[in-house]
Amino acid sequence: MKGWIFYSKDRADLPADNYEIRRIVAAAEAKGIEIDVIRPDRLEMVVGEHLAPSLYLDQEPVALPDFVLPRQGATTSYFTLSLLRFLAQQGVKVLNSADAIALCGDKMQSAIALAHQGVPMPAAMLARFPVDTDEVVRKMGMPVVLKTRSGSQGTGVMLMRNESQFKDMMQLMGNVNPKAEMMFQRYVQSSHGRDIRVIVVGGKVISAMVRQAAEGEFKANVHAGGTTTPQELTPELVELSVRVATLLNLDIAGLDFLCGEDGHFLLCEANSSPGFKGMEAAHPELNMAEVLVELAIATCQR
């Protein structure tokens, strides 16, 4: 069996501290899989004009893999999405699909899709410059969370703590980049500096953890210095997690939940390429790389 991992660096160029990719490579090789890590921009595809669809790696024809694990998440480009669609049409198992990655990469569009299905989430609103800050405050309250339309690992997320700060920021952004793609999300006081990450693979909840922000910080992401502890898998959390992953057509999902004032969970956002170093720290018995590789094998054998 042959597999590719799409990533921003080739295997030879992976930093020594790249935890997830190196772990997936090791797990795949332990299963006897021929695995490679490839920058998608090294590939070219040719279709149409009565030609057999062709794929090239560094300008040379290349045999198709059995599966691809895209690991670029919110940074996945249009080019890479097109490659994934091409590969899927040629019978390659792509985990996750291009459509699922694109939907998760757009926080507002995924919020629209999930809200339509009744998934509990904080209220969200798309920014339109010039921003009517008074209207946003009326609808979202204050403080308010400011987010870029795409992003991961806590990048592009800010807490606007008061109206003066919010108005200054919107004026600055409107002057610098009036085409910025931003959204506003209602601030959930009861979950300040804390969220719950759940990983769903193949329609099953694998594990969950509580992420706690560093002292004085708002964002709980591990990459931003947060700490992790195990989270109990309650029936409510399991049911909601599987439902969200299913609605977004995610084979692999990292779901972030906030703890609402009423004690119930609110989906904050979904990720198509979740890191798992923090999850394994919270659950030392867990081998997430092996779980992902076993999903790829099972999918290829169907």
Image (spheres, rainbow, N blue to C red):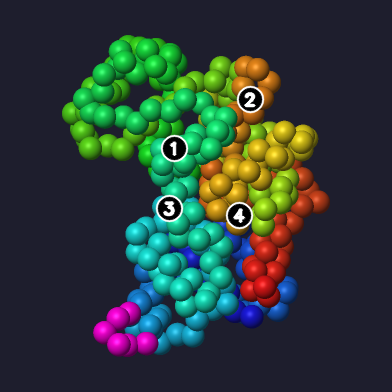
Task: Please indicate whether residue 134 sits to the left or right of residue 202 in the image.
Answer: left
Write the start and end of the magenta stretch as one range.
Answer: 47-52
Which residue in the protein does label 1 denote? Answer: 112
Residue 102's label in the rendered image is 3
Three-letter amino acid code at disc 1?
A: Ile
Q: Let me know if residue 51 is in the magenta part.
A: yes
Q: Residues within 10 Å of mark 1 (few under 14, many from 20)?
A: few
Kindly report the distance in space between the C-alpha atoms of the residues bearing marks 4 and 2: 23 Å
Amino acid at circle 2: Cys
Which SS class for mark 2? strand
Task: Determine which residue is flagged by label 4.
Answer: 252
Q: Is residue 158 visible?
A: no
Whether label 2 touches label 3, CB < 8 Å: no
Q: CA distance from mark 2 to mark 1?
A: 20 Å
The image shows residue 220 at horizontal and vertical percentages of: 58, 32
Q: What's the residue type where badge 3 is placed?
A: Ala
Label 2 vs label 3: CA separation? 27 Å
